[in-house]
Each structure stands twice: as C-alpha cells, then as structure tokens.
Image (cartoon, helix red, strand yellow):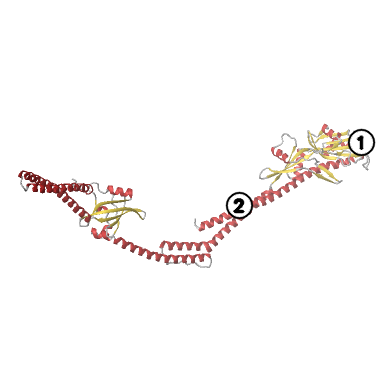
Amino acid sequence: MDLRKKTLAIICITLLSLLLVLLVLSEIVVLGGFSNTELRSAEKDTNRVLVALGNDINTLDAMAADWASRDDTRGVLTGTSSAVQWSRLSLDTFERLQFNYIILSNSSRVIIAGEGYDLNAHRQMSIPEELRSVLSSKNVFGTQLNSTTGIMGIQQLPEGPLMLVIRPVYADSGQLHSIGYILMGRYLDSTEVARLSSMAQLPLVLYGYKDPTLPLDFKTAVSGLVSQPGLFIQREGAEYMTVDAPTTSMVLNSTTLATYSLIRDIYGEPALILRVSIVRDIYDQGRSTTQYFIGLLMAAGLIFGLVTLLLLEKTILSRISSLSSRVNFIGKKRDFSARIAISGDDEIAELGNDVNGMIGELEMSQKQVRQRLNQSEENYRLFFNSITDPVIIYRFSGGDLTGSIIGANDASTDILGYSREDLLAMSPAAIIIPDEGEGTLPLTGRLWADGYVLFESGYRTMGGKMIPVEINARVFDYFGQKAVLAIARDITERHDIERLKMEAFQQIEKNMQQFALLNDHIRNPVQGIIGTADLMQNTYSEKIIKLAHVINDIIHKLDQGYIESEKIYDFLRKYYGVGKK
C-alpha cells in the first residue's frame, strides 16, 4: 500500500471513528437529553390529565358543598321537610348535572333520601350495596366522615369506577353540629374517559387494577409502580387540592410513549391504572436533528478530508512521491552520479539532502568496489592462467558431458590447440576420450552422487592427438547452477615410466629364469667332474674333488639367492603385475 492510500485510509478511519464517537455521544447525550425532555413533557401531560380528572371530582365536591349548605337539604335532615318533597332528586337534575348518584343520609349514616340514575339508559337505578357500605364506614383511610371537609376520590364498584364525594351537612352555618351527609357520584366510564381524552388531546385507556384482562404492557407497568398508602386527591386548605398518583413510563414503539398512573381509592388501595399515550414528537425531532447533524458532520468531514488530502498531496505526498521516483530511477539505472533536487527547508528537503549524501557515499563505494573487483578479476585471471595444468569449467547436466564449457585457462588452449572462443563453444564430450567399455556414464554418475571424482582418461587435441590425463573433477555452485571444475594433469611421462619399469621387471624375470637354468647346467658337469676324479685315483683326484665341492657350494649359495629373488619376484608380481598373463 502506497503512502497516498495509507493517508487516505488514516483520514477515513479517523473520520469514521470521530463520526462513531459523535454518534454514540449523540445517542447518549443529545437523544438522552431529548428523551429526558420527552419524559418531563409526558409527566406534564399526564399530570394535566390527572388534574383534569381531579377537577371533575372537585366539581362534584363543589356541587355537594353547595347542596349541603342549602336550607331545604337541612330541612330534610331535621325533619321539617319531607324527603319525598326534596325536588333536587328529579330526573332533570341528574340529566342536567350528569350525575349517577345523589344520596342524603342522617348523622347515623342511614340513607333517608337518594336516587341512582343511568345516564346511558336515561332511567333510575338502585343504589349498590358497595356504595351503601361507603356511607356506613366510620373511617375511610383515617378521614372522619364527620370532618368539616368530608372526603372525595374514586371507588371501584362492580359497575365500574365511581367518582364520588361525601360532604357533611351542618345544622347551621357555624358548622358546629353535623346532622347528616350528602354523597354525589358519577361513573368514570368510557364517555367520561373520552371527554378527558378530548380535553387533554391525548389517547387515554383505563383499566381496573385487578382486572383479569389487563394487557401485557399494563402488567409490566404495574410491576414498576410502587403502591404506597395515600389518597388520589386531597384538599389543601379551603381552596386547594393535590393529586397523588404514582406514575411510570414505557416506550410502546418508535412513535409512541405511554405513561401509566396508579389511582388509589378512598381507602388508599390501588383501584385503577390510567394509560396516557403520547406521540414521540420530541424524540423524533431529536432523532431527526441528530441525523441532520450527523449528515452535516459527514459532509463537513468529507470536505475536511478532501481538503486535508489535497494539502497533504501538495505539501508532502507529491514531494515524497517525487523523491521516491527519483531514488527508484537512480537505483534502476545505477547512476550514482545523479542527484535529487528537492525544494524547501523542511524535513523532506533534509531527507533529500541525506539521500544525496548517501548516493554520494554509494558512488564512492561503487568506484572502490569496481576497482577492487577489477583487481580481484585480474588476480583471478592471473591465478587461473598461471596453472600449468589444463583447467576446464563446464555446466553439469547430471547425466552426461553435454554441458557447455564456460571457462578454460591458457594451459587448456596451449595443450589442446583450440582457441578460447572455440573451447567456449564446445562441450566436454568433444575433448574427453571415453572408456572403451563403459564410456563416461559411471564417472558422471559418481560425480552427481558424490560431488567429486578422480579418474584417468585422455584429451583429444585439435590435431587428433590423444594425451593421457588424470582428471580431478569437482561439482560446485556457479551462480545458482551446478558446474564442474575439471583439472587435468598430463600423465604421458608417468605412462612412459610405467612402461620402462614394466620392461625392466620383465627383463629381470627373464634373467632369473636363465640364471636358474645356468645353475642346473653348472651343477651337472661338476657332479661329472667329481665322479671322474674319484675314478682316476691319482694325486690330483682329491684336489679336483675338493675344488668341485667348492664350486658346488657356490652354486648352492646361488640357489639360496634365487629363492630370495623369488620372494622379491612374488612381491613385484603382486604389486606391479610382473609375470601376469
């Protein structure tokens, strides 16, 4: 990978890493901030719904407080008026107020007047026992029914959740003596939920806390809601109220965030789960903003990368490329007298000067090496040509002597009669005389296997003359190829000496054989002389016999010398081949 590609890769990796870090940070910080903003907005929207629900209950409470302060209500409780004549329980009143229950009880919490009304069917309905039990209870989560404020909240009934309020009725405006209670209630049905949803402009879903058909997301939310004792709605002084509903949030999908609020009844027990679905506009805006920001950052990074690459190309890369090309050109041409021209006063220019200095050193070294090489070649040539024996170097193919001759000394040209150019165009087989029986294959086989061989052969000169030689051949590596160095020594004189020696040994053998015959020829006449002298029996006989015995002793000594000569002859025959057929 060249420098430009590496630079481009580094810039791309850096930008991608930066984008990745910014993307992670945007997910954590930016989208986290938008998510927190979304949650706070969702909490506000949920509180707005809960406050609207509390306002509906507060409306009931205000109506109950108004009715409890009227004289006709006191008259019914004190007995001055008949409960049947209490005109406030008319059907028009239920339709106009959109109430489901209006109940009046005495101080003993015994119902003396009251009606239930079905707003959907537009008819009267009975008061459920669960609602009667609320009136008969002395304490509702620690709040005394005979308190000056009464109670208000939500109560789960078999028919559905009911928004109710209970207000004490006093005998006079001083609120010193309670003479009864007035209860007003309205079902928190689908119509009421739809009305609250329309008011808040948010989708609302209401389920009972113990509803067996509770959806999965509600069940998940319930596990995250902490149920602590407390009332859904409480009064704070004479004019204020507070709403308390534990809330948790959950992302339903990429476009919807849901909050789940736990609404407790008048006893402080979990009664309802209210889900508020909120469109994730804030989060979507944050995501689109992040994507827009990342897109702009990518574009800016691309432009920055291109500008950086162009600046690097102009100020650094092109100069380094020019420096590299020039150095490569000098290296290929091996022209160490050339120099590099780099402008500027930075590190690249300093590098160019260092390279020029190095090339100068190489030029000097090249001159020195060339001088030494020339001297070495001259020494080699002198040494090679000073060898008096023929030296031939040829390529070794491994199976025969067909490789070309690649070198020969002056002795080779002088002895063989060929010029150096002729020898370099020949193969060793043209000058080496092979063995008449086996040829040169055994020799080349030994040479291939062992790497060297010593044998006697003959060189054929240009004039056809055969020169007996002893060849010492050895395989060596010649620039990655096998070659053979063959040194031949002229053994003509050795052959002549061997021939003369053989002739001398043969003459000795012949003389020994003649000497043995001569001993036999002498011994027989001596024996005859001894016998004749013995027959003569004269004064000379004894002297002749004595001299004959002396001659016989001399012949015996000659026989002893012949035996010793036989041992010498056996040695010569064994080691020099004398007498072998």
The earlier-in-sequence mark between 1 and 2 is: 2
Q: Quadrant of residue 14?
A: bottom right
Amino acid type at image mark 1? Leu
Amino acid type at image mark 2? Leu
Residue 17 position (above or below residue 85): below
Residue 77, numbered circle = 1
Depth check, front residue: 226 or 290: 226
**Quick check: 472 left or right of 372?**
left
Q: Quadrant of the C terminus?
A: top left
Residue 146, percent across and down?
89, 38
Residue 20, numbered circle = 2
Residue 472, percent across and down?
29, 53
**Quick check: 432 left or right of 192?**
left
Residue 540 shows up from this direction: yes
Depth check, front residue: 294 or 97: 294
Secondary structure under badge 1?
A: helix
